Image (cartoon, rainbow, N blue to C red):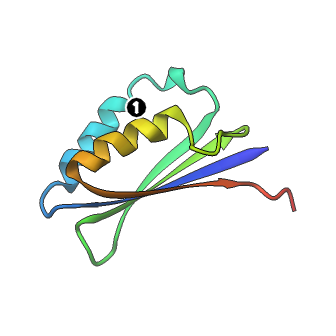
Amino acid sequence: MKALEEIHIRVTEGTRDELISKLRVSLRNRDQFPELEFLHIYYHARYETDLCLHLSWDGSLPVQGSTLALNILAGGRELGSVKHTVWIESGV
């Protein structure tokens, strides 16, 4: 089973790069998350303030999400608003 977490973060203008730097620091020791297949960071084509993160996991997740996502959410809330969803692969 695979899972995908999607995190949308809207930051105040001029803080996007600060948040991306914090994310890079928190991911330095990726060995803590062996089931994390990838983490992609996207920014909105038009709005500098909007980020979207995709975390792909090889395995199931609790309904509230991974520890990594919860930590990212806590840091994101300091800089703006966040929305987090957990998706389970359908197997079809």
Residue 14 placed where, x, y %? Answer: 12, 59
Identify which residue is drawn at 55% across, 27% down. Answer: 33
In which quadrant will I find the C terminus? bottom right
Amino acid bearing label 1: Leu
**Residue at disc 1, secondary structure:** loop
Mark 1 crowd level (few <14, some 14–19, many ≥20, 10 Å Cα): few
Residue 68 placed where, x, y %? Answer: 47, 35
Q: Quadrant of residue 71?
A: top left
Residue 20 placed where, x, y %? Answer: 28, 46
Give the side of residue 29 with respect to residue 85, left or right.
left
* Residue most extreme to the right: 92
Identify which residue is drawn at 23% across, 68% down. Answer: 48
- The residue nearer to you, when weighing 54 against 70, is 70
* Residue most extreme to the bottom: 46
- The residue nearer to you, when weighing 61 against 39, is 61
Residue 17 placed where, x, y %? Answer: 20, 51
Q: Which residue is mark 1?
A: 27
Q: How many marks?
A: 1
* Residue most extreme to the left: 14
Identify which residue is drawn at 35% across, 31% down. Answer: 26
In which quadrant will I find the N terminus? top right
- The residue nearer to you, when weighing 73 against 91, is 73
Q: Quadrant of residue 57?
A: top right
